[in-house]
Amino acid sequence: MRYRPLGNSGAVVSTYALGTMTFGAEADEHTSHQILDGYVAAGGNLVDTADVYANGASEEIIGRWIAQRPTESERVVLATKGRFTRGGVLNEIGSSRLHLRRALDASLRRLGVEHIDLYQLHAWDDVTPLEETLRFLDDSVSSGKIGYYGFSNFLGWQVTKAAYLARAHGCAAPVTLQPQYSLLVREIESEIVPACLDAGMGLLPWSPLAGGWLTGKYRRGEEPPAGSRMTLRPDAYLHFQDDRVFDALEAFEERARDRETSPAALAIAWLLGDPHVTAVIVGPRRPDQLRPALEALQLELSPQEREQLAALFG
């Protein structure tokens, strides 16, 4: 396992972060605990969840794992998110002090802990004054409820505004951003990555395999495999059904064969080769799906190789 600083903080995390959106949804509790056991045994220490994953079940499953394995869980850097509603009740959405206080306390209860290491805003809020949100996060750091805070799905200007407003008001600084990022989704490179670098924030890319499209499971002219993301949640990936994408994927698979590895491992290794990436979030549904990310840790890609792989996808 490799480790890097958590953004501009003094904490250190594994470059493979465990995403748990599948817990309580596509993975039952027993399977989820097996995944956690395998991940921690391999040296992983950054576990990422959110209050809306499986309507809170993901946090509850992790909380019971923490209670049952106190020694192993002590090594974990625990991250969760708040922002969205779990029930549509008035004041139970957004980044207001009122909602985030309730959301954070509820996450602490479900996880069975007194402190969350990394608390993240799940998305930008157009309604709540940013100063209000930042003051709440700063208060939560000061009170010991959270160690650090970060953002998810922010645009470049939103990252810059939040980081510099926190500095102007003397608040604790954000340490990370969770963006969608992969060889197939690279829009963040033009503005979001430079904004994070300017603010000293680390990157925690999610969906590094683009919903399975970078694993080799989707073939030109063939139906998606049963149980795949294209059968469960296809809308986000329909635009990949294009001959140019299939051309790139077939060339990418050839490169993976040349390296004697899997397409999934090579796709994750491409992200890990970026020094600005703190950790790549991979969300397995089964214990065996831990393997590609662990294989990726053994691959060293030169800057030239990374450029060549990126060029395949335009």
Image (tube, rainbow, N blue to C red):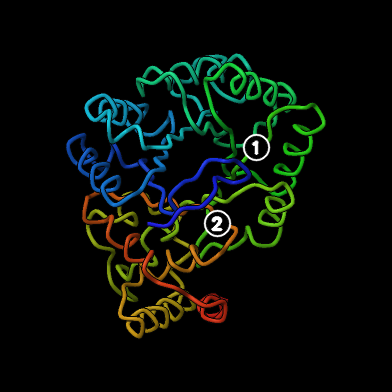
Image coordinates for residue 248, horizontal then vertical, percent = 46, 79
Which corner quadrant holds the N terminus?
A: bottom left
Q: Is residue 52 left or right of residue 82?
A: left
Q: Residue furthest right?
A: 168
CA–CA distance between discs 1 and 2? Answer: 15 Å
Image coordinates for residue 153, horizontal then vertical, percent = 58, 44
Residue type for callout 1: Pro
Label ID, residue 258:
none
Secondary structure, mark 1, is loop
Nearer to me, 273 or 250: 273
- Mark 1 is surrounded, within 10 Å at the Cα level, by few (under 14), some (14 to 19) or many (20 or more) other residues, namely many
Image coordinates for residue 159, horizontal then vertical, percent = 70, 43
Label ID, residue 174:
1
- Residue at the location (51% across, 34% down)? 118
- Mark 2 is surrounded, within 10 Å at the Cα level, by few (under 14), some (14 to 19) or many (20 or more) other residues, namely many
Q: Is residue 161 above or below residue 269?
A: above
Numbered circles on residues, count: 2
Residue under label 2, please give it: 277
State which tag comes first along the sequence, 1 or 2.
1
Nearer to me, 137 or 252: 137
Q: Is residue 29 above or below residue 104?
A: below
- Residue at the location (53% across, 25% down)? 146
Which corner quadrant holds the C terminus?
A: bottom right
Residue type for callout 2: Val
Image coordinates for residue 182, horizontal then vertical, percent = 50, 62
- Residue at the location (30% across, 54% down)? 231
